[in-house]
Amino acid sequence: MQTIIYAVEDGVATITLNRPRAKNALDTVMRQELTEAIATIQGDASVRAVVLTGAEGAFCSGGDIRGMQESTAESARDRMISLHNWCEPLINLDRPVIAAVDGVAYGAGLGLALTADIVLASPGARFCAPFLRMGLIPDFALLYTLPRVVGRQRAKELVFSAREVGAEEALALGMVLEIQPVDRLMERARALAASMAAASPVALSIAKRALNQSTDNSLPAMLEIEASGQALARLTQYHQGAVAKFLNKEAPPFQWPARQG
């Protein structure tokens, strides 16, 4: 890997964007390596949770503008489709994803952060959808994720203004779950990931997929997912073991870390 660092420890895969001179902008090589990393995670059942972060004080400054010199609409569209080939699998990954954001998360970097189930930020984190500054529209699934996170009206304001959002405002908007000191950011992200890695993989996968679908489905459809999913979860060895521990007054296998900071 030339542009990312991929490591797995105790069931948690950490993907670190590693182009610090470019503030970890997404170039062609990084896109391909992220595609490979996501495919590796999909095929590795031992990976139970994922942490996304960036190296040396930046999360991701967006797409590499030097690589945006397509001569035709067709080539530009093909470029976006190649991005979607791993963006959609990341959003729908059947394991929890945590983004640890320090510094800039601009453009596609904001999109990458919002593919995560949980976003943690340092006080110096900065979020922005600057596409209109360049005469472009939001990409990296932001047209899907941003209104679901902040609401449609606020999403329009953030896109139309192309303004920067600091960590505190991002917390208030629901883009960020917690703000952590920069020296504790990765520690907290790994603690949450390790906790979720100890949860039932079947139950967590079903719950994540159902929640991702909830804004597009009717109540009857969601109730059917709930009934079928719960029936499947009850048959797992994990559930049966958790029930046995409860009856024996033992600590449950899944423990959520206490909220910090």
Image (cartoon, helix red, strand yellow):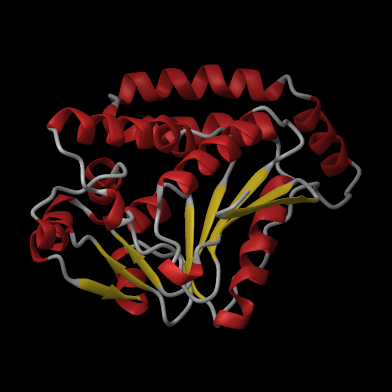
Task: Give residue 165's quadrant in the image.
Answer: bottom left
Query: Relative to 110, is 123 above or below?
Result: below
Q: Quadrant of residue 56?
A: bottom right
Could you tell me residue 208's position as x and y percent? Answer: 50, 36
Compared with 188, 228 (above or below) is above
**Would you identify the image quadrant in which residue 235 lies?**
top right
In the displayed structure, would residue 258 be above or below residue 225? below
Counting the numbered discs, the total is: 0
Q: Quadrant of the C terminus?
A: bottom right
Which residue is at 60% across, 40% downward?
37
Q: Position of residue 213 (x, y in %)?
A: 37, 30
On the image, the x and y values in percent for residue 178 come to 48, 70
Task: Specify whether 108 is left or right of 189.
Answer: left
Tell me where residue 232 appears, x and y as whole percent.
64, 18
* Above or below, 1 relative to 76: below
Q: Residue at x 40, y 33 (%)?
A: 88
Left/right placement of residue 259 relative to residue 213 reads right
Q: Is 216 left or right of 197, judged from the image as shown?
A: left
Q: Residue at x 63, y 78 (%)?
A: 184
